[in-house]
Amino acid sequence: MNESLDSTQCDRYSRSLLVKSFEEADQHRLLTSRVLVVGAGGLGSAIIQYLAAAGVGTIGIVDDGTVKPSNLQRQTIHGVDDVGEPKVDSAARFVGALNPDVTVETHSVRVEPDTAEALVEGSDVVVDGLDNFPARFLLNDVCRLEGVPFVHGAVYGLEGQTTVFRPGGPCYRCLLPEAPDPDVAPSGEPMGIFPTLPGTIGCLQATETLKLLLERDGILEDHLLRYDATDATVVRTPLERDPDCPVCGPDGIDSIEDVDYGGRCRIER
């Protein structure tokens, strides 16, 4: 397989190629990679922007929403002229203007049990830009069953978190076995978010995604990184695989068919 870049690509990615240990073969690997970004909002904006700039060859974007004026405070791939348009279409236009090397596959659908497996199929990495627990639990379960790394991120107020779940290590249910009570942590409802916070967490997710695609060492997979923008505090908390996890444990499920993703997303054993 020819892994050389053409002259235009050598120029475009020249600063990447100046990074120690980053070679043309690495850029070629990115150009032939497939990443699914689920959510084209605040987190998704940073993730999509930097994966596209880095030259990830195929980016699938999943979001069933439309651009609203209140999105523009933090969702930087959308603009005033995009208000009312499907987010996936606005995101695709942004990527097309940024990097013609990138193919965008748009999916204006909700992440549900009858769509999740088809969305994940063929992806090298799935990235979490979601704002609700049911879809996040569903994607975690499908990714683990399909053996696809899942790069998690979440933001609220002035706080955010990220980590990587990949086969052999802990999964999202090891961190959070079931969704919290809606009275404690509302899911999918409008919430206060400091404008730059999704960019901070989304950039970290994009970085970990690139490291996964390039099979680099030091991937953030056994720790949860929490960032508090109030005082710029970063805390890394160790994550361990739960031997009784209903998904990644030795007696875990082998299908999502009987899992109820309504309410608390609990898996009964």
Image (spheres, rainbow, N blue to C red):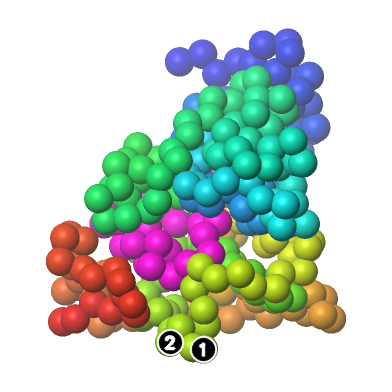
Q: Position of residue 26 (x, y in %)?
A: 59, 32
**Depicted 111 relative to depicted 159: above or below:** above
- With 29 as the anchor, is 197 left or right in this view? right
What's the residue at 66%, 51% (across, down)? 68
Q: How many neighbours does mark 2 have within 10 angstroms: few (below 14), some (14-19), or many (20 or more)?
A: few
User: Which region is colored magenta?
Assistant: 128-151
Q: Is label 1 in contact with label 2 (beta carbons under 8 Å)?
A: yes
The picture places residue 20, in percent across and down from the top left corner, at 74, 40
Q: Which mark is residue 102?
A: none
Tell me the residue that label 1 is attached to. 184
Residue farthest to the top, as pictured: 7
Which kind of residue does numbered mark 2 sit on? Asp
Residue 33 vs residue 115: left or right? right
Residue identified by numbered label 2: 181
Above or below residue 254? Residue 247 is: below
User: For numbered disc 2, what is the local secondary structure?
Assistant: loop
Label 1 secondary element: loop
Q: Is residue 133 magenta?
A: yes
Instruction: For marks 1 and 2, give the CA distance.
Output: 5 Å
Mark 1: which amino acid?
A: Val
